[in-house]
Image (spheres, coloured by chain):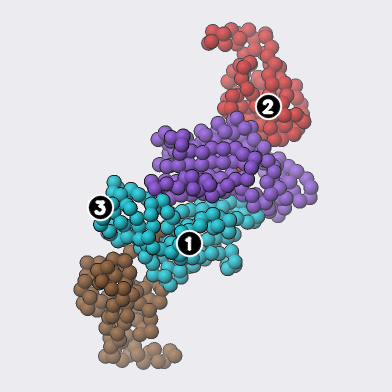
Chain colours: A purple, B cyan, C brown, D red
Amino acid sequence: MQLPSKNRLVELTDQPIDADTLTQFVTTPLSGAVILFLGTVRELTQGKRTTALDYDAYPEMALAKMNELVSETAEKWPVQKIALVHRTGHLEPAEASVAIALSCPHRGDTFDAGRFLIDELKVRVPIWKKENWSDGTTEWVHPSAE
Amino acid sequence: MQLPSKNRLVELTDQPIDADTLTQFVTTPLSGAVILFLGTVRELTQGKRTTALDYDAYPEMALAKMNELVSETAEKWPVQKIALVHRTGHLEPAEASVAIALSCPHRGDTFDAGRFLIDELKVRVPIWKKENWSDGTTEWVHPSAE
Amino acid sequence: MKTAVITVNVRKTEHMKITVKLFARASQLARASEVEVEVDGGASVADFRKALEAQHPKLKPIAGSLFVAIDSEYSSDDQVILETAQIACFPPVSGG
Amino acid sequence: MKTAVITVNVRKTEHMKITVKLFARASQLARASEVEVEVDGGASVADFRKALEAQHPKLKPIAGSLFVAIDSEYSSDDQVILETAQIACFPPVSGG
C-alpha cells in the first residue's frame, strides 16, 4: 500500500523529540491500536556510566533511508499513519534519540511493524553515536567493535 | 523481580487517558527503550460503523487482575517502570480505552512485555465493551459470540 | 475460624442466599446488576451454576459461557462456595 | 547521457579526483569530514577502496569494515564510480 504523504512524518532534528505530538499525529478513527517506541539514552552499559551520547548523521542518506523504511513498513503492514523521528547532537541520559509512532487497525500489526522499523533503522540508517563515558573518555560506537 | 510500588501505576478511570504522562512516568536513565501502546476506538469493524463504545468493568476484580498482570510482566522481563490504565464509560472513535507504558534496558523486551500485557489483559481482566452502531442498535461484545 | 467453616460445609441441608453481581450481557439479560441465588450449604461452583440457571432462566442464553468469579478470582467448578464470598458472573471479557 | 558515461568508463587512463565524505570513527581517524581520493576513470568500488586505503593510511584500522555509499545508496564492490556521484565512507551504523 502506498502511504499518502499526509499520513507520514519523517524527520531528522537537533531539537528534543516531542513524542506526544507524534502519538497524536498517528491516532485516527480508522485505527484500533497505536504504538509509540522511544529509544532513550541509557546511563549504564555493562557497568560503565554514560554521561551523554553524541549522535552524528549523514543527513541526506539518513533521511532517504528513513523514508525507504517507512515505505517498506507500510507495504508489509496495514499502517494508517506513521512517524519516524531521529535526533542528532548531544543527548543526556533519559532523552529520546529516536521515536517511532504508528497506528494500525489491529494491535498485533503495530507491534510487528514497530519492531521491524526500529530493527532495520539500527542496521540501515547512517547515524552513529559516540559515548561520553563518566571517566571523561569518548568512543564512537560501531557494532563490529562492540 | 519484585517491582517497587513507586515504579508501577495501575488505574481504572472514567476520565480521558493522558498517555503522555504515562510515557514520561516510565522514562528513566536506567532504560534504553520505552514503549507506549494505546488501544483506541476504531470506527469501522467489518464494514459496520461504530459511533461509540461503552466500557463496563467489575472494578475490584479488574484492578486486582491488572495488578497481577503487571507483576507477572515484571517477573518475565527486566521492566524498570510500568503503567497500565484502562478507561471505562462512553468513548468516541479515536479515544484511548487502554494504555500501557513500560521501559526496559533493551528494546526487544519492551515489545515482548507490552504485547504480553495487552494480550493477557484482553482475556483476563473483567472489562467489557458495548458497541453503539451507527444504525442506533447496541451490542455487548463477547469474544465467543463474535 | 477453620472449624466454623467446616461446620457450615457439613450441614448441607442449610440453605445459603448468595448475592451475585452481574456484568455486561449477563446484567442486560437479567435486567439487574445483582441477583440472589439460593444454594445448599457446601455447594460447589457447579451446583451454583445449576441453581443460577434454574432460578434465573433469563440467563439461559449465555449460561454455558458465564465465568464465575469468587472474591475477584476465576473459580473452578469443584470449588466450594462460602457464604461470605463475593460472587460475580459475567460473559467472556472484551476490554482493551 | 548514457553514451557520455560509457566514454568516461572506457578512458581508464583518465584520473578522477573524488571528494569523499567521512563520518563517525572514519572522520575521527582521518581528522577530516571530507578527503580526496584519486582513482582511474571507470574505477569500481573495489578499486576505490584500495585507493582510499593507500592514499589515507590513517583509515587502515577500520578500512575492512567501511561502507561505501554512492548517492545515498549502499554500494556493491563491482559497482562503477562516476565522477558526478556523491561518495561517503563510514563504519557500521549505531543510531537508534
Q: Which mark is residue B85?
A: 1
Q: Chain of mark 3?
A: B
Please report the residue visible at 68 percent of the width from the left and 46 percent of the height from the top. A91
Which quadrant of the view contains residue B53?
bottom left
Q: Position of residue B14 (x, y in %)?
A: 43, 64
Residue at the right extreme of this rendering: A136
Disc 2 to disc 1, how far (Cα)? 49 Å
**Location of residue C86 with respect to B139 vertically, above or below:** below
Q: Give the Cα distance between marks 1 and 3.
A: 31 Å
Chain of residue at mark 2 = D
Q: Nearer the viewer, mark 2 or mark 3?
A: 3
**In the rendered structure, are the residues bearing label 2 and label 3 in contact, judged by CB atoms less than 8 Å apart?**
no
Depth check: A99 or D25 in front?
A: A99
The answer to whether residue D26 is seen in the rendering is: yes
Of marks 1 and 3, the one in the foreground: 3
Considering the numbered disc 2 on the image, is that residue within a helix, a strand or a loop? strand
**Cβ atoms at labels 2 and 1 below 8 Å apart:** no
Q: Secondary structure at mark 3?
A: loop
Residue shown at the point (48%, 53%) measured from the top left = B37
- Disc 1 residue type (three-letter): Val
Identify the image quadrant of the N terminus of chain A. top left
Q: Which residue is under mark 3?
A: B135
For the C terminus of chain A, give its image quadrant: top right
* Residues packed near mark 1 inside 10 Å, few (<14), some (14 to 19) or many (20 plus): many
In front here: C21 or D7?
C21
Q: Which mark is residue A80?
A: none
